Amino acid sequence: MRAFLLRRAGRALVTVFVVLIATFGLTRIAYRNPAASLAARNDNQQVIEGITRALRLDEPWYLQLWHYLFRGPDIQGAPMGLFHAPPALGYSFRRQQPVTDLILSKISATASLALGALVIWILVSILFGVLAARRPGSLTDRVLGGFSYVGLSLPTFLTGILLSYFLFFTLSTYGVRWFPSSGYVPLTEDPFEWARHLLLPWATIALAEIGIFQRVVRAGMLDVLSADFIRTARAKGIPEWRVHFDHALSAALNPLITLGGLELAVVFGGAIVTERIFGIDGVGRLAIDSALTGDYPVVIGTTLFASIVFILANFAVDVVTRLRDPNLRAAEALV
Amino acid sequence: MSDALPAAPEAPPRTLASRISRERSARFGLITIATVVLLAGAAPIVAAITGHGPTDQYPAEALSEAGVPVGPNGDFWLGADGNGRDVLVRALYGARVSLLVGIPATTIAAVLGTAIGVVSGYFGGALDRVLSQVTDIVLSFPFVVTALSLVALNLGADGSPRISPVLLVIVVIALFAWTYVARLTRGLTLELRHRPFVEAAITLGASHRRIILREILPSVAPAVIIYWAVQLPTNIVAEATLSFLGIGVQAPTPSWGNMIADAQSTSLYQVQPWFLVVPAVGLFLTVLGFNALSSGVRNVLDPAR
């Protein structure tokens, strides 16, 4: 297990490093004249030159990268340098804040969105998948199959618009104000308002994912239900619901974990569409707003954030799958 | 002799095409897709009949005094949008964009991904490690933000795009989509590498080129073709999403994504739903059709699932 972990960690580090270099290069080439686009609209030439000096934009790119990676000069009192304790991602002139602080301040919204949606979509998918697999071809299976097609075929932005139209706009024209149309209330401030504001965004993300995951659970269950250990469990007289939800499900869960980790990482790295439609001020919105305005330090920071989340999720999936694998567990015990 | 044998069970339909066309969801998918393709092909004809081009604006005829677009009538069959443009004509041209971006992007991804996956799985060793690492790196880039950087990269010094935005969207989608194909084909190739027929070819002294082209590719191809059909709807949605966010196909060129964005941003759809509903239904049915077809084909080829 240790050798496996070390190997994976090495690969993950290489991946993060290459993503960093590539994003740095890409943004430095793509955003022409960044100092001018970072400055406020009515700033004079002096300010632009100041920004140029502060970001070392007048130096060759490898020196810029050097300043970015190792501790360069502080900008507005904010340290630079990824290999600095604590790691710092530079300074956003447009938002007048260190990039690290910016990202950290948006994580709670994005995490609430991603993790809440994950809980909903996994629970619903398991329930629907197990029900559908009970009798393949039955009415339940066909109805749930149709639901999964719809979920799979509705793009997130369309689901978001439809949900906010019917559940916010139409309901509120009848005076029913259950769901707010936008905004985010931190959990620590008011748990009820937190959930109320996130219900529609959660549903938006969950619907698309349920379309995929429900099928994964169903296929896994159908595979497992014909296995010998299920016949044994039935022969032992274990109630049928326990055979399904206990024995079969835990064996059918592996593809769910693998796919779940990857999809969670994608949502966590920036549910850009959902955050935009429902006005949630998360990492995804930060990323796209910065990319649109040419705030390149934030673009690098959010890209790095998304890829680190992706790599960590992959890593976690690998470890969990290995820990759950009975054959590997037995082999580890022998070592 | 022969009449002593028991009656043979009814033979399943012989050809693959007839088996696929008998599968219910595959048939639904085929009909839906054929309809979309026909309608996309008919776009110029409809434009000629109605006399409305896809980007022509008719504020006088199509907008009320308050600026609310008209609903379906004899002139504007499916109503008009907030700029007084014909929704039907635009939606039909939008179908063309969807297909013209989705199909090439998916095909490029399939070819590139297969090439990288097969080479990686066949040769193994250091080459495999490098290519797998490259796949990991591409996968860990966030799609939309990277797409935005590439759009910015595509702007020339004077602010006009260097290559057409439609071409760029194809490149961006293909750039991300090949990774999944590469992972799939690498896994399949690793398995095939030790099958008797491949080892026989190696023992006979066949060249790598010959083994890859004649032994491995034909065995990998069916999975790649199925995966092509699975990925196509995803890529059509990717194009629509990029266009919805304003970084894909650029206005005034109609695409379902930017038509929906237009409808949403003005909130006029709350008064006049038609110009949201038409592109939305078009996109939904197209994606649903391809999803149904691909899962129907999988049912036929892999009945265990």
Image (spheres, helix red, strand yellow):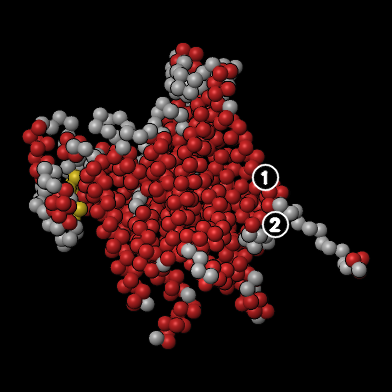
Q: Where is residue A270 in the image (x, y as percent from the top left)?
A: 36, 49
Q: Is residue A182 visible?
A: no
Residue B27 image label: 1
Comparing A22 with A278, the one in front is A22
Q: Which amino acid does label 2 sit on?
A: Ser
A225 to B83, vertically: above or below: below
Res A29 quadrant in image = top left
Comparing B182 with A189, the one in front is B182
Disc 2 and disc 1 on one polypeptide chain: no
Q: Residue at x 38, y 55 (%)?
A: B139
Q: Residue at x 63, y 59 (%)?
A: B302
Q: Quadrant of the N terminus of chain B?
A: bottom right
Res A177 quadrant in image = top left
A298 to A325, vertically: above or below: above
Classify mark 1: helix, strand or loop. helix
Q: Which residue is drawn at 61% across and 47% down?
A: B293
Q: Which residue is drawn at 62% across and 37% down?
A: B34
Name the residue carrying label 2.
A138
Q: What residue type is labelled 1?
A: Arg
